[in-house]
Image: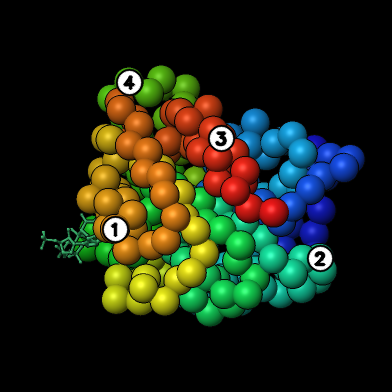
C-alpha cells in the first residue's frame, strides 16, 4: 500500500470495497511511523483503516510538534480534510496520549479508543528528553531505546528494525515527541471520556507498565484489558495478532 497525504500528514489507507462503520484511525508513538502497527490490522477486512505518519515522521514533512494537544489538532485537521466525521482511534504509546486528547478535545469525532502500551500520564526518564536534543547521539539513543522497548524473548532482528526506524526520524522530532510525552497528564480528566475503550499492554512493558493500563481500565468506559505475557512496549510487533484481535473486538461493537 502506498502513502497518501492530506492536511500536511502522510497516511496509509486501506479501503476495502463495502467497508462499513466508523473508520479505524491508527496513531503511532514517539519516534515511530505507521509501520509500528501490525500489518494485519492495517489491512483489516471490512473496515476502512487509516494509519498516519505523524508530522515530521516517516513520509510526513517536518516540522514535528512538541505537545500532544498540537498533534491532536493536526489530526482533527486530517479528519476534516478526509471528510471523516467519526473514527475509532487507536493509539500506541504517545499515540495513545493523542487518542485520549482527541476524545477529550473533540469527543464528537471519537467513536471508540484502542489504547495500546500507553497511559494517562507519560513522564519520561529524566535525561532521555535532553539527550535527544543532541543530534550526534541519535543512533546510540535509538539502540538504547530498542533495548527498553521489547520483552526478553524478542528477536535481535526486531530490535534492529526498531532502532533503524527510530534513527530515521529526525532527532529534533524525537526530542519534540519526548517533550510532548513528558508534559502529558490527563489522569484527572479520564472521567469526562464517553467513548468505549479497549486496552492492551505487554506484561513486560517497562516504558508504560501494566499499572498504567490498569489505571486506564479503571477510569474509562468500555471493557477489555489484555495483558500479553512475555512481551514489552512494542506489543504491536511482538504480539501483532493479539493487538489485531482486540481491535476487531472493539470494532465489532461500533457501527
Ligand atoms: N497511570 C497510572 N499511574 C501512573 C501513571 C499512569 N500513566 N504515571 C505515573 N503513575 C504513578 C506512578 O506509578 C507513581 O506511583 P507511586 O507513587 O505509587 O509509585 C506516581 O504516579 C508518580 O509517578 P511519575 O509521575 O511517573 O513520577 P516519578 O517521579 O515517580 O517517576 C519516571 C518518573 C520518569 C522515572 C517514571 O515515570 C518512569 O519510569 N516512566 C516510564 C519510563 C519512560 O520514560 N517512559 C516513556 C513514556 S513515552
Residue depicted at x 52% and y 64%: 195
In the rendered structure, are the residues bearing label 4 and label 1 in contact, judged by CB atoms less than 8 Å apart?
no
Residue that badge 4 annotates? 153
Q: Is residue 159 left or right of residue 28?
A: left
Percent across and percent down for residue 132 are: 38, 59
Q: Is residue 42 left or right of residue 126?
A: right
Q: Quadrant of residue 65?
A: bottom right
Pointers 4 and 3 in contact (CB under 8 A)? no
The tag earlier along the polypeptide, 1 or 3, is 1
Q: Secondary structure at mark 2?
A: helix
* Residue indicated by mark 3: 244
The image quadrant in which ligand 1 is located: bottom left
Q: Is residue 112 above or below residue 207?
A: below
Give left or right: position of 20 versus 98.
right
Residue contact between numbered discs 2 and 3, judged by CB atoms under 8 Å:
no
C-alpha span from label 4 to label 3: 20 Å
Crowding around mark 3 (Cα neighbors within 10 Å: few <14, some 14 to 19, many 20+) is many
Q: Residue furthest right?
A: 17
Which label was assigned to residue 218?
1
Amino acid at each position: 500500500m502506498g502513502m497518501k497525504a492530506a492536511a500536511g500528514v502522510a497516511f496509509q489507507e486501506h479501503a476495502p470495497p463495502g467497508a462499513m462503520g466508523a473508520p479505524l484511525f491508527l496513531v503511532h508513538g514517539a519516534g515511530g511511523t505507521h509501520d509500528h502497527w501490525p500489518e494485519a490490522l492495517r489491512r483489516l477486512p471490512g473496515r476502512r483503516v487509516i494509519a498516519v505518519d505523524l508530522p515530521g515522521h516517516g513520509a510526513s514533512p517536518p516540522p514535528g510538534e512538541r505537545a500532544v494537544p498540537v498533534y491532536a489538532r493536526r489530526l482533527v485537521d486530517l479528519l476534516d480534510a478526509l471528510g471523516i466525521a467519526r473514527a475509532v482511534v487507536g493509539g500506541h504509546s504517545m499515540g495513545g496520549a493523542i487518542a485520549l486528547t482527541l476524545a477529550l478535545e473533540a469527543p464528537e469525532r471519537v467513536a471508540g479508543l484502542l489504547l495500546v502500551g500507553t497511559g494517562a500520564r507519560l513522564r519520561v526518564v529524566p535525561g532521555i528528553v535532553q539527550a535527544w536534543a543532541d543530534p550526534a547521539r541519535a543512533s546510540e539513543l535509538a539502540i538504547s531505546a530498542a533495548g527498553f522497548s521489547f520483552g526478553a524473548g524478542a528477536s535481535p532482528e526486531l530490535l534492529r528494525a526498531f532502532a533503524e526506524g527510530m534513527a530515521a526520524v529526525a532527532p529534533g522530532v524525537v526530542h519534540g515527541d519526548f517533550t510532548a510525552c513528558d508534559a502529558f497528564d490527563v489522569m484527572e480528566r479520564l472521567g469526562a471520556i464517553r467513548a468505549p475503550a479497549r486496552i492492551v499492554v505487554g506484561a513486560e512493558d517497562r516504558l508504560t507498565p501494566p499499572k498504567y493500563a490498569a489505571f486506564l481500565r479503571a477510569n474509562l468506559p468500555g471493557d477489555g484489558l489484555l495483558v500479553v505475557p512475555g512481551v514489552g512496549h512494542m506489543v504491536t510487533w511482538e504480539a501483532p495478532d493479539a493487538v489485531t484481535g482486540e481491535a476487531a473486538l472493539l470494532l465489532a461493537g461500533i457501527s
